[in-house]
Image (spheres, rainbow, N blue to C red):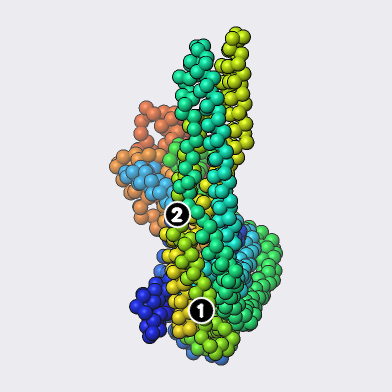
Amino acid sequence: MAKMWKLVLCLMVAGWSGAAAEIGHNMNNITRSMLREVADVMEMVEVNYSTPIINTTYIASVEFDMRAMGPLYNSTHIVIDAIVNKQAYPEGIVTVADGHVYIKPVREEWRKLLVHYAGPTAFVVVAVLVIAVLPLAGLFWCCCYWCRVGRRRRPFDRKYDACLKGLLAIVLIALLTLFLFGVVCAFATDSQVESGTAEAADSLRAGLRDAREFLNATQAHARWLLVVNYKELETKLNAMLYSIGVTASVKLGEFSRAVSVTTLNKMVQQLDEVQADLRTVQSLTASLRHRAEQLNSGLRKVKNQLLQTLAKCDQPKCVALQNKYKIGQLDTEIQYSQMPDVSELLNNVTVLLESDIKSEVAEGQKVFRDIQRGIQRSVDQHIPGVSEALGEAGQRLAGLADRITWLAGNASERLDRQRGAADALATLHARYAPPRRLAGLGAAAALLALTALLAWGLMCGVCGKRPDVYGASDCCNKGAGSKSLLCGSGMMFLLGGGVTLVMLVYFLAGVVAQRFLCDPLTEPRDNRLFADLEKLVDLEKTLFNEQTDPDFNMTSVLVQCHRNQTVYETLQLRRVLDVAAAARALPGSLRARVGALRPRLAPARAAPVAILRAPARHKLRQLADSGLSDFDFDRIRTALETNMTSLALDSLARQLNSTAASLQQPLFAGEARSLRQAAAALAALLQDVLQPMQQDSAQLNTTAARLRDSLRFNHSSLKEAIAYLMHETTEAEVFLNTQGPDRLQNMTQEFAEVIAGKLEEYLERVLHAARHEVGRCGPLSNAFNATRDAACNKILMPTNGYWMSLCWCVLLFAPLLLVSQRLARLYLHVDAYPGPLVEAEYLYDAYADRDNVPLANGSKRSTLDIEGKIAEWRERSAPSAPPLEGAAGGAGAGGGAGGGAPAGTRLLLAGADVVCQLVAPPPALIDDLKTRLDAKDEDNESGIHESE
């Protein structure tokens, strides 16, 4: 726009000092017209760039179905952050310099490492202790349990044992529910680990495929932009270049009003036609006058004849004919005497044509045409150079597109070679998935079996009956529940170490992968491992073999790619493919080529330009004064507008024949004949005179209208048109001799600026597309995220969820052991709470001082068992029998006195005799009791001998 205003100022300042005020006014009009035309030139090169249609389908997906494990997976990061430091290793342990990694010795930095890894170390130590302690604790528990089998136990519940069993059962149900939650999570997470590892190879292939598709789409878009769009621009610019000469000459003629000489030449070249038309007018006018006289004479004769005939005929038909047609008024109405004579105009035009006015004016047209041809030649000789510059620019851009294609092809080929990694993943999964699956499912199945065993024991304990004294009742009583709970406790000791070992392995794998793999890839900023990796792999030096931008690293590349910026900006490809430098270089060279056009008005013209010479101007003035502009051709048309006869001859002739035919009497035969002769005379006049006159009149009307319109040349008259065109031609001569060369150069400069501006506009379009449109990193970021999530979300997240599920179950081992042990002892009680008296007697008897008789303690359990059976028999067989306090007391007293047998043995024998007398039990039972008592006595005696 600034250049346009400079051009305006130049045109306003420039002018010819000797020109008249009117010429100066017209120069301003020329300036405004020139500005409009330059704006039209800029619109001539408006390019509608096409856009590429690239159909690319990306298949990598970052979706992950958590299968209702969302709360667990979302909590894994919180738990890991609570246990493990967010940095993979402490600061200062790893040092990267000159592409080498230096790790400090563990002996020197063990304190720092221990502080950094305190959480994982504590977890591992606790897990190892659990693995080591659980089997030993189980062995100790088994030994203690079997050692306590011979101890005397209370056969009935205490006062609050029923309430305690209910509370413990509720607690156990809650613990088993929590435990079952961990078991279900273990199965679900293990299944997702398996599905994630199975899909890892396909996810990697999909990510690599999407990356290759992205590279192919990017290079296709870049090639379209640099090659196809530039071809569109080049075609438009070449078309404008080859029309610059013609356009400049035409526009110069329009600016300078030199086209007026062309109009004058056309006017003069039409003089032959004007002469011919004038001769036609003269001839037709003479012919019309002659025929008018013939028509007038013939009509007078017919009229006289008809008047005489009708005067003799008194028939109604004759009277009607006379009244209708007014035969006395039959005459001509031609006003040819009013038509002007064109003989003088014809003579003037003929004289001008004979004075060779056509060649004089054509010579002025030839002068201007030579100027235009000179401009065309001066422009055309430089057009090939400009076109070649455009072609060179296109070749540079095509080379740039080829380089982009080569880089994209190399990157795509390297990605294609990584398909072996996907195959390796598939091979590893096929080899190691079965044992991993077996270990994972084995641990989960062991926990499920433990849950089922404890649940069965709890159900039997809650819903089953008390165990009977014989131990021969159904398998679903409280005794069976106690045994199930005890078996569950034993299974905890037996399998807990293996489950903890599996948990430890998964914990180590999950934590290490989380801190050393997923965390750096998910959030590379402020990550120590990724920062050291950037030092080890210097991306800037790898790509460009230089180190100038400290902010350019893998972190910035990942962050910008995730923000969907273009590859050109993300990877700073301007260092390799500097589109901006090309944008600066190409318009400069092209502008220099276009500036060499320099069209000239005429080759080395010394004399000033003279379009019309003096003889031509003199003859044009003669033409203006020839009378053509003053001749009123409308007078001819006005004279021809009236009817030629007062009555229609054809209608009158038909009526005369009709009237003659109606006169059938012989008396009127002469009148009939006279009417027919008059009708024939009228028909002859119509055909031989009137119709030719009508044709000549129509031709004369057309010729007069053509002369009237063609001699005005868009002005009111020929004289005014010639004066205006001669004035315009004079201004054109002044313009061409004073301002023409400068204006022409300015216009050519505008052409150059338009071409360079369009090229700059195209290059700005290329630069904008490279920075904001071509190769946006969204698909590449999605492929990266999908590949990363295939490992971090689909494999690692379930892995962490799995060991957390196992850890949850292991933490519940201790409360489950305590509650199940306590319930197992409670479920072994045979009787309900008997009351405070019996409990007091039992406590008194159980805690009596019998340490002076060693054998007494040895036979406690047997004595209690027999006493319990005797009490049960008493209740079942003889509920109304008298108590045995005396017998028992006597036996006790006797025992206290010291007999041959121990006191406990004598008491049991006395009780057995009493029971036998009262209930009369079966002999087999009595024999069994005696055998057991004898065995006890032998054991007691052997114990006594050993003590002695």
**Image spot of residue 666 (x, y percent):** 62, 9
| Residue that mark 2 sits on | 632
| Location of residue 349 with respect to 890 vertically, above or below | below
Instruction: Give the quadrant of the N terminus.
Output: bottom left
The residue at the far left in this view is 836
**Image spot of residue 423 (x, y percent):** 69, 65
Q: Residue at x 48, y 79 (%)?
A: 733
Q: Can see residue 774? A: no
Q: Residue at x 44, y 76 (%)?
A: 731
The foreground one among 76 and 618 is 618
Secondary structure under badge 2? loop
| Location of residue 498 with respect to 614 vertically, above or below | above
Question: Of the numbered discs in the image, which one, if any, rests on residue 614?
Answer: 1
The foreground one among 878 and 605 is 605
Q: Count every numbered label the image shows and give the total.
A: 2
Q: Amino acid at mark 1?
A: Ala
Q: Amino acid at mark 2?
A: Asp
* Callout 2 crowding tier (Cα within 10 Å): few <14, some 14–19, many ≥20: some
The foreground one among 899 and 304 is 304
